Amino acid sequence: MRLKLKTVFVLYFLVSLLGLIYALMQLGQRCDCTEHDMPKERTISRLRGELHRLQEQTRRLEATKQPRKESSLPTIFVITPTYARLVQKAELTRLSQTFLHVPQLHWIVVEDSQHKTPLVGQLLAKSGLSYTHLHVATAKERKLQEGDPSWLKPRGVEQRNEALRWLREDRKAQTDARGQQGVVYFADDDNTYIFSDEERTIRHRAAIPFQVVRFHVGWRPSRPFPMDMAGFAVSLKLLLSNPDARFDGNAPMGLLESSLLQGLVTMDQLEPRADNCTKVLVWHTRTEKPKMKREDALQAQGLGSDAAVEV
C-alpha cells in the first residue's frame, strides 16, 4: 500500500513537471489570436455601419428640412452709441452675444470718437453679425466732465442722429419696397435685452412695451412721452417719411426721447407691445466700473500693466 501511494505521487509530480515545461515553452511562441479578436472586429464593423447610417439619415433630414427664410423677415435695425472706457469691450461683447440669437438683425454701432477705433472695429468684425460701424465725436461743450452727474447733459445725441442719417441714406437707396421695411430700436450698450418677433410687427407707428391709456411714472409724468430710450421702437417707414425727425441735443433733462417721438407720432398712435405690456424685456445692467487705485499706484512706480493690452 505504501508503494502504491509513492508511485502515484511520483506520477503526479512528473505530469505536473511536464505541464510546467510545456507552459514555459509556449511563452516565446506567437499566438494566433484571430479567434479571440473576431468578436471585437465584428463589433467595430457594426458600429461603423450604424454611424454611417445615422450620418446618411441626418443628411437626408437636412436636405428635406424647410430652411428658415430669414431674408423674408423685416429687419431690426439696432442703434447703439458707445464711447471708450474700461468696460466698453465687456458691454459690447454682451450685446453682440445677445444679438446673435436674433435673426435678420443689423447692428449700427456709432462711436463717440474722431475716428473708428480698432477695439470696436475688431469686435464687430469677429461678432458674426451684420453691422455698420460709424463714428462722430460729441462737441466739447456737450460732453460731460469728470465728476458731472450723468443726468446733467444728454448723452449719445450726435451718435444716434448719425445713425439715423446713415439709415435714411442707405435705405432710400434701396430700389425694392422690402428694403424700406423694418424696425428701428435704440439699444444702449449698458443694458441687457430680450428680443422677440413682436418688434417686427410694428407697421406704421411707434411701439412701446407698456400701456398707453395713461402713464404712471415716478419722475416728471408731464413729459410729452415719459419713457426711457429703451422703451420704444419705431417703424423704419415712419422714420423715412419724416426726414426731419431727430434727437434734440438742447432738449431739457428727460425730454430727449420726446424730442424724437414728437416728430413722428402722437400719444394715441402708440402701439403697445411686450405681450400687452405684461413683460419686462430690458434691464439696466451696466458693468461695474473697475477700481484702478492699485493700477495707478503701480504705474507711478513704472510697473503698470502693458498699455498694449486690450481690455
Image (spheres, grey):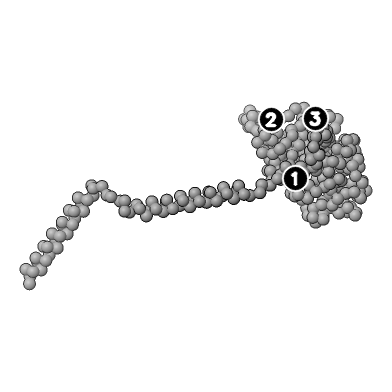
Q: What residue type is labelled 3?
A: Ala
Horizontally, residue 37 falls left or right of residue 59, namely left
Q: Can residue 108 be seen in this view?
A: yes
- Marks 3 & 1, CB-CB < 8 Å contact: no
Residue on which the image places disc 1 = 73
Residue 137 circle label: 3
Q: Quadrant of residue 238?
A: top right
Q: Can residue 259 be seen in this view?
A: no
Residue shown at the point (7%, 72%) measured from the top left: 1
What is the secondary structure assignment of the residue under circle 2?
helix
Q: Quick one: 113 or 71, which is closer to the camera?
A: 71
Residue 118 circle label: 2
Label whose residue precedes the other's in the sequence (3 or 2): 2
Closer to viewer: mark 2 or mark 1: 1
Q: Which amino acid does label 1 sit on?
A: Leu
Label whose residue precedes the other's in the sequence (3 or 1): 1
Label 3 crowd (10 A; few <14 / some 14-19 / many >=20): some
Label 1 crowd (10 A; few <14 / some 14-19 / many >=20): some
What is the secondary structure assignment of the residue under circle 3?
loop
- Residue found at the very far bottom of the displayed protein: 1
Q: In this view, does 258 lie above or below 43?
A: above
Label 2 crowd (10 A; few <14 / some 14-19 / many >=20): few
Residue shown at the point (85%, 32%) measured from the top left: 142
For marks 3 and 1, give the CA distance.
34 Å
Residue 146 location (% of width, % of height): 79, 34
Q: Quick one: 293 or 265, which is closer to the camera?
A: 265
Residue 169 location (% of width, % of height): 82, 32
For marks 2 and 1, give the CA distance.
32 Å
For marks 3 and 2, give the CA distance.
16 Å
